[in-house]
Image (cartoon, rainbow, N blue to C red):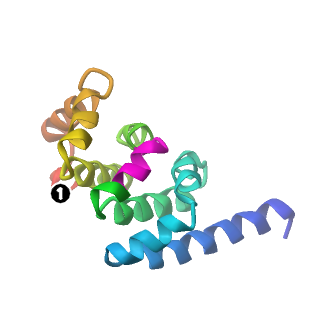
């Protein structure tokens, strides 16, 4: 196994560990955020490896179910922008996970909702309406 493959496998196993840790209550979410890995997880949404990308989406979805200050930590490292890109994915499961994450942000405080509403002249909201008209219903059902 070459170094790239070995490193990729380590990243995948690490992400799965973080996924399991993030799937819990706000205390568990706080513990994951305390690892200070949230920026890297958001960056890995741009990975060319679909398994890495999807695992990061699931982690982010879990973390975005937390308290307002926990959600803000992810907003501060660019999660809205990263999820907006994923909304354009050709893969239904990716779009669904991105929609879930963005809906968690919109369920937060008014500042979080405003960030979604004001993102690139309502691009996310417009994409949601487009998805309602053209996408499979299971993608847009939160």
123 or 6: nearer the eye?
123
Q: Would you place residue 70 above or below residue 90 in this image?
A: below
Magenta-highlighted residues: 71-79
In reply to whether residue 130 is colored magenta, the answer given is no
Q: Is residue 1 left or right of residue 34?
A: right
Q: Is residue 71 left or right of residue 3?
A: left
Q: Position of residue 41 (x, y in %)?
A: 54, 56
Which quadrant, please, contains the N terminus?
A: bottom right
- Work out which residue is located at the far front of the displayed protein and give it: 69
Identify the residue position indicated by label 1 in the image. 142
Q: Main secondary structure of the magenta part?
A: helix
Identify the residue at image location x=28%, y=62%.
67
For residue 97, say whether it is visible. no
Identify the residue at image location x=52%, y=73%.
18
Q: Position of residue 63 (x, y in %)?
A: 38, 63
Which quadrant, please, contains the C terminus?
A: bottom left
112 or 49: nearer the eye?
112
In reply to whether residue 78 is colored magenta, the answer given is yes
Identify the residue at image location x=37%, y=59%.
70
Identify the residue at image location x=34%, y=78%.
24
Q: Position of residue 130 (x, y in %)?
A: 19, 33
- Work out which residue is located at the far top of the displayed protein and give it: 121
19 or 107: nearer the eye?
107
Disc 1 element: loop
Q: Is residue 76 left or right of residue 68?
A: right
For residue 38, say whether it is visible. yes
């Amino acid at each position: 196994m070459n170094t790239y493959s070995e490193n990729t496998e380590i990243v995948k196993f690490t992400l799965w560990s973080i996924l399991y840790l993030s799937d819990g209550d706000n205390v568990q979410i706080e513990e994951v955020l305390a690892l200070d890995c949230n920026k890297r997880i958001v960056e890995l949404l741009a990975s060319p490896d679909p398994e890495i990308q999807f695992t990061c989406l699931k982690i982010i979805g879990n973390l975005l179910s937390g308290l307002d200050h926990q959600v803000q930590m992810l907003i501060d490292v660019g999660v809205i922008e990263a999820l907006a890109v994923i909304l354009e994915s050709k893969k239904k499961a990716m779009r669904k996970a991105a929609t879930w994450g963005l809906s968690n942000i919109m369920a937060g405080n008014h500042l979080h909702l405003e960030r979604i509403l004001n993102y690139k002249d309502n691009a996310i909201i417009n994409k949601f309406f487009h998805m309602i008209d053209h996408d499979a219903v299971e993608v847009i059902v939160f």
